Image (cartoon, grey):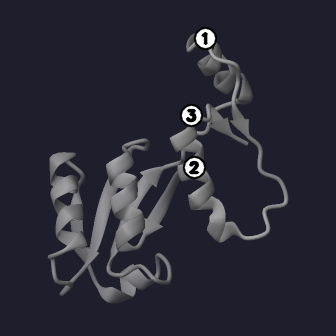
Amino acid sequence: MKEWIVGRNPVYEVLRARRRNFFRLQVASGVEERGRLGEILKMAAAGKVPVSRVSRQQMDSLGEGNQGVALEVSAYPYVALADILQCAEERQQPPFVLALDLLQNPQNLGTLFRTAEAVGVHGVL
């Protein structure tokens, strides 16, 4: 399954994380290729990701807030709870899992993930 990631920061972070397969990068014609977009294009070239220039209309059909860039990627590689527990066992540590339920403010999700990474959580449910 494939999906589109749109926007300069989301595309940059997905390329940086390298957890997915990259199929193609689309850039709106006439967009300035400096700053974050310049970094995205360098990363795409280094990863041999095909880049195509498309009209603003084509780009807008992929989603709002695209900022002139979109990356077609594979689905996110989720893991099963058994894999999380196996990770803890391999590290000879007690399982440390962050379980999220009824999250009130989804904007806090990034903060929760960063904190989980910083304190050594084996997985997030």
Mark 2 and mark 1 residues within 8 Å of each other at the beta carbon: no
The image shows a total of numbered marks equal to 3
How far apart, in angstroms, are the residues tagged by discs 2 and 1? 21 Å
Give the percent coordinates (x, y) of residue 82: 72, 22
Residue most toward the right? 102
Position of residue 83 relative to residue 99, above or below, is: above
Q: Residue at x 19, y 74 (%)?
A: 35
Label 3: element kind: loop
How far apart, in angstroms, are the residues tagged by discs 3 and 1? 13 Å
Which of disc 3 and disc 2 is earlier in sequence? 2
Which of disc 1 and disc 2 is earlier in sequence? 1
Report if residue 85 is visible in the image: yes
How far apart, in angstroms, are the residues tagged by discs 2 and 3? 9 Å
Q: Residue at x 57, y 49 (%)?
A: 115
Mark 3 and mark 1 residues within 8 Å of each other at the beta carbon: no
Residue type at mark 1: give it: Gln
Residue type at mark 3: give it: Gly
Residue at the disc numbered 1: 92
Whether residue 10 sits left or right of residue 56 in the image: it is right
Label 2: element kind: helix
Residue at the disc numbered 2: 115
Residue type at mark 2: give it: Thr
Residue at the disc numbered 3: 120
**Quadrant assignment, res 38:** bottom left
Sort mark 1 into few (<14), some (14-19) or many (20+) by Cα contacts within 10 Å.
few
Give the percent coordinates (x, y) of residue 112: 62, 54
| Image quarter of the C terminus | top right
Give the percent coordinates (x, y) of residue 1: 55, 48
Q: Residue at x 32, y 80 (%)?
A: 68
The circle on residue 123 is none
